C-alpha cells in the first residue's frame, strides 16, 4: 500500500521572488486530472473529514498554514503544511481532515481523478468497514 509523504518541490531562488512548480508524474506520483482550492476558512473550522476509494491527492499550502490529519484505520498522523515549496501526497484510502487554518491560508488540492461523488467515504465507521473489506 502506498504511504503519505511530504514531497519537496523545486525551488528557483530569485531576488525578485521565488518560483516553485510541479508536473505530471515528475514531482507528484500521478497524472493530474483536477485541481481545487480551499480558502477563507473561518477560525476553528475543519475541512475534509472523508476518504477517497480511488482518488489520490497532493496538497500544497500556497499561502498561510494548516494541519492535515491522516488516519489509516489504525493510527493518526499530523502534517503541518506552511510552505509553498513542499506538499503532502495522500494515497487513496486514507481518512483526512484539515484544521488549524491560519488567516488568509490557501490550500491547493491536485487530484488524480475528476470529481466523483461515489468515490467519497464521508462516514468514519463506513470507511473502516470499507477499508477492512478491501484489504
Image: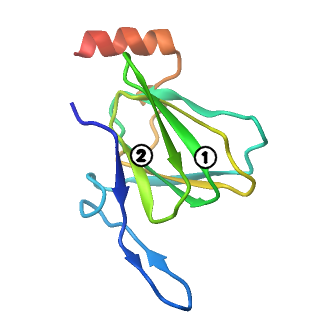
Q: Tell me which corner region of the image, top left, top right, bottom left or bottom right, holds residue 46.
A: top right
Q: Disc 2 to disc 1, how far (Cα)? A: 24 Å
For the residues labelled 2 and 1, say whether their Cβ atoms are less than 8 Å apart. Answer: no
Reading the image, the residue beneath label 1 is: 66
Residue located at (24% from left, 36% from top)? 2
Viewport quadrant of the N terminus: top left
Query: Considering depth in this image, is 33 or 107 the residue closer to the camera?
Result: 107
- Left or right of 128 on screen, residue 2: left
Percent position of residue 90, x then y = 37, 40
Q: Is residue 50 above or below residue 6?
A: above
Q: Tell me which corner region of the image, top left, top right, bottom left or bottom right, holds residue 45.
A: top right
Q: Is residue 105 above or below residue 129?
A: below
Percent position of residue 17, x then y = 55, 85
Residue at the right extreme, as displayed:
42
Query: Considering depth in this image, is 56 or 85 the residue closer to the camera?
Result: 85
Reading the image, the residue beneath label 2 is: 114
Q: Is residue 44 above or below residue 71?
A: below
Q: Earlier in the sequence, mark 2 or mark 1?
A: 1
Specify few, some or many for label 2: CA neighbours under 10 Å numbering under 14, 14-19, or 20 or more.
few
Specify few, some or many for label 1: CA neighbours under 10 Å numbering under 14, 14-19, or 20 or more.
many
Percent position of residue 99, x then y = 63, 37
Viewport quadrant of the C terminus: top left
Percent position of residue 114, x then y = 41, 46
For numbered disc 1, what is the local secondary structure? strand
Amino acid at each position: 500500500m502506498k504511504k503519505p509523504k511530504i514531497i519537496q518541490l523545486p525551488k528557483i531562488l530569485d531576488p525578485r521572488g521565488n518560483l516553485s512548480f510541479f508536473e505530471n508524474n515528475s514531482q507528484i506520483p500521478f497524472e493530474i486530472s483536477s485541481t481545487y482550492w480551499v480558502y477563507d476558512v473561518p477560525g476553528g473550522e475543519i475541512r475534509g473529514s472523508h476518504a477517497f476509494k480511488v482518488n489520490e491527492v497532493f496538497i500544497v499550502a500556497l499561502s498561510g498554514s494548516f494541519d492535515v490529519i491522516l488516519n489509516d484505520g489504525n493510527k493518526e498522523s499530523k502534517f503541518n503544511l506552511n510552505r509553498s515549496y513542499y506538499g503532502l501526497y495522500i494515497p487513496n484510502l486514507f481518512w483526512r481532515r484539515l484544521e488549524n487554518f491560519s488567516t488568509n491560508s490557501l490550500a491547493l488540492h491536485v487530484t488524480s481523478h475528476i470529481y466523483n461523488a461515489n468515490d467519497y467515504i464521508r462516514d468514519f465507521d463506513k470507511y473502516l468497514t470499507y477499508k477492512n473489506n478491501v484489504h
